[in-house]
Image: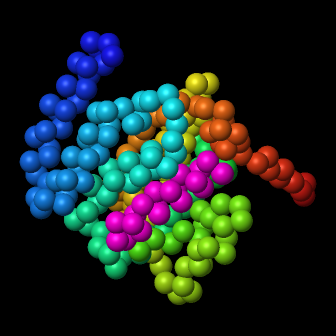
Amino acid sequence: MTSFRLYSRAVLLLGILPMLGGCGDPFTFKLATTGVIAAANGIFARTDVNLKEKNYAAADLLVSQMRNQVGGLDRIHALPLEEVGSDRLTSPFGMGIAEGIGLRFIDLGYSVWLHDVAGEGNQNLYPAPPKGQTPDFILKGSYAVKSSDVDVYLRVINVKTGLVISAFDYTMPLSHEIRNLAKTQTRIFRVQQK
């Protein structure tokens, strides 16, 4: 490991330590510390891409920010991540990231609607949101595919206030698998002349 990497990790840890003091209860401190250690140990910088591992680490970081605002009875609606620069287009990658993070939220005791992010063949696994009920929070985001990596931008938004209560952005290497998953379906629009 180069000295620059060691230096940057040390700066990251020293910069975050004062914020960890305000975590309050031991569970929040443990969750926040786990996220910091994951980031410092390069989970998001490694060249091998384990999407489940990255989704879980990202979910843990989001939960560390939203813990005091979202309860177990609050409903979170997971929406597919949209490709930056497209008109609300998504891909199996955008759906898989949201699904993986939603599943981790469920593991941590949150109520999450995953129907809209069910991958191909998984539509029957997650029931549709109950009619007449609205979510309290929305998990959404976007991603930008670049030449050698992909940027992921995640947000948890309070539906009533419209405020972002939790956010996390990260970059991962663009492997062959991710490149294929991130391909959006081409849409053809017809414009009728009057």
Residue, far bottom: 132
Judge by depth and name the residue closer to the eye, 92 or 129. 92
In this rendering, position of residue 21 left or right of residue 47? left
Residue 183 placement (x, y as % from top left): 71, 42
Q: What's the colour scheme?
A: rainbow
The answer to whether one can see residue 52 in this image is yes
Whether the magenta-drawn stretch holds residue 32 is answered as no
Residue 4 to residue 143: above or below: above
Identified at 34% across, 71% down, the residue is: 109
Q: Is residue 193 left or right of residue 95?
A: right
Residue 70 locus on image (x, y percent): 30, 69
Say if 103 sits above or below 145 in the image: below
Residue at image position (34%, 79%) is 73
The part of the image, by quadrant, that contains residue 31 is bottom left
- In percent of width and height, residue 154 lies at 44, 49
Give the x, y percent position of residue 14: 15, 31
Indicate left or right for 147 with 56 as reference. right
Which image quarter is the N terminus in?
Answer: top left
Q: Residue furthest right?
A: 193
Which stretch appears magenta?
92-110
**Residue ranking furthest to the top:** 3
Describe residue 128's horizontal placement relative to residue 29 as left or right.
Answer: right
Q: Residue at x 62, y 39 (%)?
A: 178
Asked whether residue 137 appears in the rendered view, the answer is: no
Quadrant occupied by the C terminus: bottom right
